Amino acid sequence: MRREPLSFEGFLLVKLIYMKQIIVWLVIVTILLGIIFWSRSINISTQSATNIWSGISSDNLSDLVVKNSLYDFGSIKMSDGDVDHTFTIVNPTDHDIKVDWLYTSCMCTNAFLESSSGEKGPFGMEGMGYVPPVNEIIKPGGSVDVRVVYDPNAHGPAGVGTIDRFVMLTDDQGRQLQLEIRAIVTP
């Protein structure tokens, strides 16, 4: 049985059908790739949110230590005002460590460095006004306190819910120690 050749119109119709199928498949593949990359970026950001903010790598950790680097206030009311927690930072080494910088991850949080020479601060969010250098030397075996003050009213009604804030100490070698506070803010 012999097939008749396609007319020019028939040829264009077949070509158009194939082109539509190719475009549909390209759109489907593009959407699937977009979903895959989007889900990977969300997974990466949730796994290492603190490291993304602080830029800390394991090579960049300070020799300074703190017993608990995370403090959870639990549920706090906006109407009760500011809450604070004090972290004790210890120098376990046999040499002086100079703390150059102390800053926070949000303007709703301030930090104060308390030592035998007095209180320094407030230290706030880097890039939101002047954050002065700390210039505090911690002797071997010595310690300082970092008092973190969180203002649950700073964000107004939009600040209700779970919060997670960070405080970063940077020594004169560029090494960092990160502190963290959490709370559930209610009206």
Image (cartoon, grey):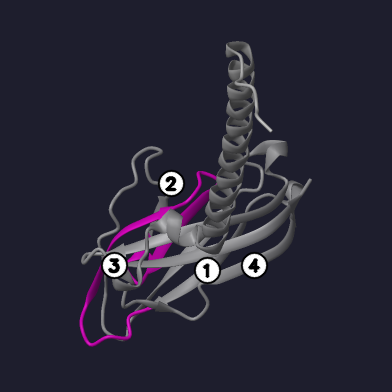
Query: Which callout, 3 or 4, points at the residue further toward the start of the chain?
Result: 4
Res. 2 image quadrant: top right
Residue type at tag 1 = Thr
The quadrant the N terminus occupies is top right
Sequence-first tag of 2 and 3:
2
Residue 36 location, x and y as percent? 57, 51
- Which amino acid type corresponds to the residue marked 2 in the rendered image? Met
Front residue of 49/171: it is 49
The region drawn magenta spans: 90-119
Asked if the residues shown at circle 2 and circle 4 are in contact, with their CB atoms under 8 angstroms apart, the answer is no
**Tag in front: 4 or 1:** 4
Q: Amino acid at mark 3?
A: Arg
Residue assigned mark 4? 72
Residue at the (64%, 17%) spot, across then down: 10
**Amino acid of disc 4:** Asp
Look at the image and tell me in which quarter the C terminus lies.
Answer: top right
How far is the residue under mark 4 from the one under mark 1?
A: 12 Å
State which tag comes first along the sequence, 2 or 4.
4
The answer to whether mark 4 and mark 1 are in CB contact below 8 A is no
Sort mark 3 into few (<14), some (14-19) or many (20+) by Cα contacts within 10 Å.
some
Task: Provide the residue designation for mark 3.
Answer: 175
Q: Secondary structure at mark 4?
A: strand
**Cα–Cα span, label 2 and label 3:** 18 Å
Name the secondary structure under disc 3: loop
Nearest to viewer (mark 2 / mark 1): 2
- Residue 67 spot, x, y in % from top left: 49, 81
Question: What number is the disc on residue 86?
Answer: 1
